C-alpha cells in the first residue's frame, strides 16, 4: 500500500523544508498537495511534507466498523472506483457511503482524481488541469496510517509537521451509531498526539461538536470553527450568516481558538475604482483573540477580480493579515511567503 509514497519520498528526498518566518501565516496543505496528486492519498501527503507545509489536513469519516479514514466526503464515489468494485451497494440516492463499507472493503478501492459526471453522463475531472483520471495503486488511508507517515517523515527529515483534522458530518455519524470525535481522539491518543496543542488543530463546521469537545471532552487541542454558507448543506444547525456577526463571533470565541472562513467571506470583489473590497471579519476575529485560517487558495480556481495566484496570496497575507491559509498548492504559498520575507529589511 505504501509503494507510491516510498517512490515519491525518494524523488523528493533532496527537498529542504523551508523554515517558516515567525510572523508568516501557516501554510496548511489542503487535502495534501492536492493540486498535484489525487487528494488525501498518502502520496499527496508525502509531497505536501516535502514542499514544506506547516500543517497537513486530514478530513475524517468512519467506516462501517468505526475506523477513522481520511476522506473528504461521506461518499466514496467521487474519488474512488467503488461503483466498479461494489456494484449494487449504492443507497437509493445513487451514492456510495463510506459508513456502509467495512475497512477491509474500503482497502480494496483505488483512489483517483476528484471527478464528476458531465451533461452527457461521462466521468470527467473536476479540475481538468490537474492529475489525470488514470488508474493508480493509491488507496484510502486510515487516520492512523497517515499519522505514521507524517511522523516518520518528520523523523527522517528532521521536521515537525502539524496535523489539521476535520470531523466530517458528526451528526450523520451519530445517527449511524458512532461518535466520530471519540474515534478520532482515540487514534490521536494511541499515536501520542492527543496532548500536542502546538502540533494538532481540530476543526468542524458543527458548533455543537466543538462545544462538546471544549466543555465535556476538555481537550487541550486548539479548536477551529469552520464557517460556510447556509446553502451548502453542511451537517450542522448553524446559521453561518449569524455566526459572522459581532454577536455570533463573540459566541464562537467562548469555545473555539480560531475560525476557518471561506475566503469569499473576507474578499468581496472589486469596487468601481478596481480596488479590492475586504470585510472586517479578520479584524473582528483578531480583536477577540481568534486565529483566522481561511480556505481554499487554488491557483486554478481564482475569485472574480483576481488576476493570478500571487495576487490572491498577496491580498490575504499583506493586506488582510490572515494567520494561516488552506491551499492545494503548498509549494506556491511557501515560495510566496519566502519572497516576502526576503524583501523585508533586517531588524535591529
Image (cartoon, grey):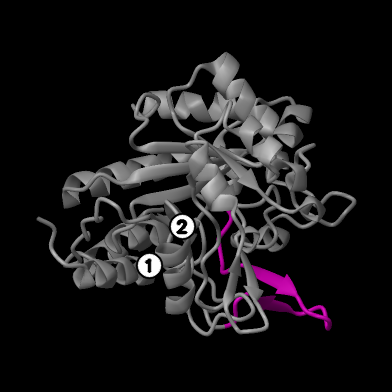
Q: Earlier in the sequence, mark 2 or mark 1?
A: 2
- Which residues make up the magenta segment? 108-128
**Residue found at x 67% / y 83%:** 272
When asked about the image quadrant of residue 19, the answer is bottom left
Judge the density around disc 2: few (<14), some (14-19), many (≥20) Cα neighbours within 10 Å: many
Given contact means CB atoms under 8 Å apart, are the residues at marks 2 and 1 in contact?
Answer: yes
Residue 57 visible here:
yes
Asked whether 325 or 102 is in front, the reply is 325
Q: Secondary structure at mark 2?
A: strand
Asked whether 96 or 261 is in front, the reply is 261
Q: Quadrant of the C terminus?
A: bottom left
Q: Position of residue 29 (x, y in %)?
A: 43, 57
Q: Residue furthest left?
A: 348
Q: Secondary structure at mark 1?
A: helix
When asked about the image quadrant of residue 123, the answer is bottom right
Q: Position of residue 158 (x, y in %)?
A: 16, 48
Q: Residue furthest right?
A: 92
**Residue found at x 62% / y 59%:** 279
Q: Is residue 122 magenta?
A: yes
Relative to 25, 134 lies left or right: right
Question: Compared with residue 187, is residue 287 higher up or lower down, i.e. above or below?
Answer: below
Q: Using the numbered discs, state the Cα–Cα distance from disc 2 to disc 1 in whole angstroms.
A: 9 Å
When asked about the image quadrant of residue 118, the answer is bottom right
Question: Compared with residue 53, is residue 145 higher up or lower down, i.e. above or below?
Answer: above
Question: Compared with residue 219, is residue 115 higher up or lower down, i.e. above or below?
Answer: below
Q: Is residue 126 magenta?
A: yes
Asked whether 184 or 120 is in front, the reply is 184
Residue at label 2? 325
Main SS of the magenta part reads: loop
Q: Position of residue 76 (x, y in %)?
A: 67, 54
Judge the density around disc 1: few (<14), some (14-19), many (≥20) Cα neighbours within 10 Å: many
Residue at label 1? 333
Amino acid at each position: 500500500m505504501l509503494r507510491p509514497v516510498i517512490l515519491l519520498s525518494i524523488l523528493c528526498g533532496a527537498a529542504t523544508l523551508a523554515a517558516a518566518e515567525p510572523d508568516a501565516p501557516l501554510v496548511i496543505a489542503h487535502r495534501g498537495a492536492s493540486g498535484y496528486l489525487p487528494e488525501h492519498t498518502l502520496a499527496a501527503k508525502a509531497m505536501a511534507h516535502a514542499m514544506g507545509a506547516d500543517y497537513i489536513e486530514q478530513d475524517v469519516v468512519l467506516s462501517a466498523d468505526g475506523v477513522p479514514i481520511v476522506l473528504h466526503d461521506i461518499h466514496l464515489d467521487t474519488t474512488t472506483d467503488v461503483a466498479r468494485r461494489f456494484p449494487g451497494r449504492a443507497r437509493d440516492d445513487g451514492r456510495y457511503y463510506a459508513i456502509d463499507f467495512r475497512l477491509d472493503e474500503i482497502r480494496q478501492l483505488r483512489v483517483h482524481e476528484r471527478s464528476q459526471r458531465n451533461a452527457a453522463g461521462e466521468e470527467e475531472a473536476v479540475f481538468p488541469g490537474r492529475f489525470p483520471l488514470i488508474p493508480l495503486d493509491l488507496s484510502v488511508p486510515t487516520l492512523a496510517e497517515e499519522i505514521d507517515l507524517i511522523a516518520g517523515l518528520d523523523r527522517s527529515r528532521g521536521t515537525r509537521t502539524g496535523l489539521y483534522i476535520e470531523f466530517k458530518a458528526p451528526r450523520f455519524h451519530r445517527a449511524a451509531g458512532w461518535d466520530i470525535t471519540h474515534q478520532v481522539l482515540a487514534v490521536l491518543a494511541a499515536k501520542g498526539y492527543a496532548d500536542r496543542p502546538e502540533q494538532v488543530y481540530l476543526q468542524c463546521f458543527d458548533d455543537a461538536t466543538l462545544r462538546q469537545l471544549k466543555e465535556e471532552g476538555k481537550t487541550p487541542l486548539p479548536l477551529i470553527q469552520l464557517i460556510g454558507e447556509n446553502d451548502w448543506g453542511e451537517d450542522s444547525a448553524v446559521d453561518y450568516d449569524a455566526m459572522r456577526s459581532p454577536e455570533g463571533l463573540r459566541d464562537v470565541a467562548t469555545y473555539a481558538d480560531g475560525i476557518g472562513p471561506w475566503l469569499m467571506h473576507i474578499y468581496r470583489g472589486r469596487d468601481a475604482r478596481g480596488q479590492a473590497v475586504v470585510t472586517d471579519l479578520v479584524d473582528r476575529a483578531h480583536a477577540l483573540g481568534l486565529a483566522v485560517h481561511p480556505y481554499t487558495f487554488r491557483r486554478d480556481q481564482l475569485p472574480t477580480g483576481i488576476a493570478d495566484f500571487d495576487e490572491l496570496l498577496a491580498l490575504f497575507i499583506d493586506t488582510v493579515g490572515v494567520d494561516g491559509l488552506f491551499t492545494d498548492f503548498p509549494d506556491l504559498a511557501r515560495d510566496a511567503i519566502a519572497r516576502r520575507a526576503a524583501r523585508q529589511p533586517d531588524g535591529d
